[in-house]
Image (cartoon, rainbow, N blue to C red):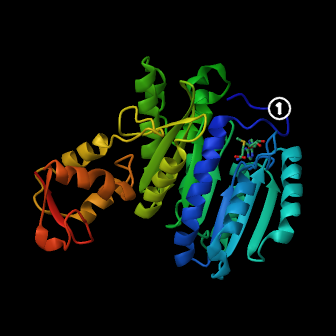
């Protein structure tokens, strides 16, 4: 993706995909997070001008409006701080004026800070101050959405993830990594992006698919070292060209599951493609109806394990070990598996045929 020079640029289809997933996830995230926390933080570290050329909303406005529209707000007393960071003065000013227009309609529990600064500098200062006061960063959702690969150090992501409830949604500009030799000082940027030097072993791999797998697996494992327990990644394509990948890191199984639900909900619509991580070339589309990869994954995982509780299957599918989510387990996998004789159900663990309530015991045949 070329870096736009204009203050406001055209929204490309893949960025639209990123926004739709963000919006669907935030709708699901707010009820979860607000049930255990009274103060939450939304960071948009590369906030942009808040609008695109044809009037489409940018990520800070999407976040404000999604939270505003959330029915839960009427019933809870939690506070949300929005921390928008944007380096470019004209873009920051544009965002400022859009937020000013929205402010009269926003609840008093919304606190909005817009800063013209660099993400890494600004957040490092804020975290240093929090550390100096012996306090803790509030549970946060941090969107980290740069144009390139600089200024997004893994060391900073590790600091964000120190809070158990924090989550990160990071765009990794694969095209930039791929073209790294064309840029000055790129080693330094990639050392900081990955938080290690091992990316050098991947960058020279000739086969493009293997190179991508190596570099994405490395980024994923570095995010896990930085504190994410689950990492969901999806790739945004334009025709056959991989433009960038989004990595979502969380410590919570439910967060991981909800992110995958958001992707499944959004994926079939629009001029962009999402591809999954685990199922070879799993391109989600409107016609997607063959859940054989999910069935196979369940069989492989639990074959030979004897009687298991349905919760073990749900936990596995919800985790980052599959591209699927919990709502697909019963209707898209277990029912078919039972019809085909691929599973045996302990009838004493359920009251009705073809139902799979909590506590159902089954085994792979
Ligand atoms: C991909 S755009 C963000 C788009 C926005 N998140 C959205 O989805 O609507 C990246 C933005 O980051 C800004 N930027 C570039 N380097 C930055 C840095 N180091 N810190 C903060 N902002 C930066 C750019 O000016 C640009 O507006």
Q: Mark 1 points at which residue?
A: 5
Q: Is residue 92 above or below residue 125?
A: above
Which residue corresponds to the image point at 31% horizontal and 60% vertical from the top-left?
Answer: 314
Whole-percent x, y for residue 66 in the image? 67, 62
Res. 9 in view: yes
Measured from the top left, where is residue 100 in percent x and y?
A: 88, 62
Residue 132, relative to residue 101: is it above or below?
below
Q: Is residue 252 visible?
A: no
> Looking at the image, which is closer to me, 99 or 269?
269
Q: Is mark 1 on a helix, strand or loop?
A: loop
Residue 199 left/right relative to 130: left
Q: In which quarter of the image is ligand 1?
A: top right
- Residue beneath the point at 42% across and 38% down: 217
**Left or right for 78, reference 242:** right
For residue 180, which quarter of the picture?
top right
Splitting the image into 4 quarters, where does residue 108 fall? bottom right
Residue 17 location (% of width, % of height): 61, 42
* Residue in the image at 75% along x and 56% along y: 61
Write the residue at 67% across / 66% down.
67
Place of residue 190 in the rendered image (x, y in percent of width and height, measured from the top left): 57, 34
Density class for disc 1 (Cα within 10 Å; few <14, some 14-19, many ≥20) is few
């Amino acid at each position: 993706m070329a870096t736009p020079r204009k203050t406001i640029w055209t929204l490309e289809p893949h960025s639209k995909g990123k926004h739709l997933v963000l919006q669907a996830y935030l709708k699901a995230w707010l009820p979860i997070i607000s049930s255990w926390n009274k103060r939450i933080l939304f960071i948009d570290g590369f906030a942009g001008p808040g609008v695109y050329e044809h009037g489409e909303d940018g990520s800070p406005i999407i976040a404000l409006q999604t939270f505003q529209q959330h029915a839960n707000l009427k019933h809870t007393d939690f506070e949300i701080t929005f921390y928008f960071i944007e380096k470019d003065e004209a873009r920051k000013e544009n965002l400022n004026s859009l937020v000013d227009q929205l402010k009269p309609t926003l609840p008093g529990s919304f606190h909005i800070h817009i800063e013209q600064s660099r993400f890494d500098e600004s957040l490092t200062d804020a975290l240093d101050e929090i550390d100096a006061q012996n306090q803790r960063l509030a549970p946060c959702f941090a969107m980290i959405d740069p144009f390139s690969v600089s200024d997004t150090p893994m060391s900073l992501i590790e600091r964000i993830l120190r809070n158990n409830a924090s989550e990160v949604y990071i765009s990794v500009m694969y095209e930039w990594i791929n073209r790294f030799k064309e840029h000055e000082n790129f080693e330094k940027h990639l050392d900081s992006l990955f938080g290690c030097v091992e990316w050098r072993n991947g960058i020279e791999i000739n086969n493009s698919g293997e190179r991508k797998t190596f570099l994405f697996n490395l980024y994923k494992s570095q995010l896990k070292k930085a504190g994410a327990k689950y990492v969901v990644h999806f790739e945004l394509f334009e025709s056959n060209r991989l433009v960038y990948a989004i990595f979502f890191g969380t410590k919570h199984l439910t967060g991981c599951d909800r992110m995958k639900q958001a992707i499944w909900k959004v994926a079939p619509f629009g001029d962009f493609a999402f591809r999954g991580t685990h199922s070879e070339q799993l391109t989600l589309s409107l016609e997607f109806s063959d859940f054989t990869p999910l069935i196979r994954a369940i069989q492989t995982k639990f074959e030979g394990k004897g009687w298991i509780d349905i919760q073990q299957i749900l936990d596995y599918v919800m985790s980052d070990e599959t591209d699927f989510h919990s709502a697909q387990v019963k209707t898209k996998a277990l029912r078919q598996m039972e019809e085909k004789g691929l599973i045996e159900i302990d009838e004493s663990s359920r009251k009705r045929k073809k139902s799979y309530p909590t506590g159902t015991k089954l085994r792979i045949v």
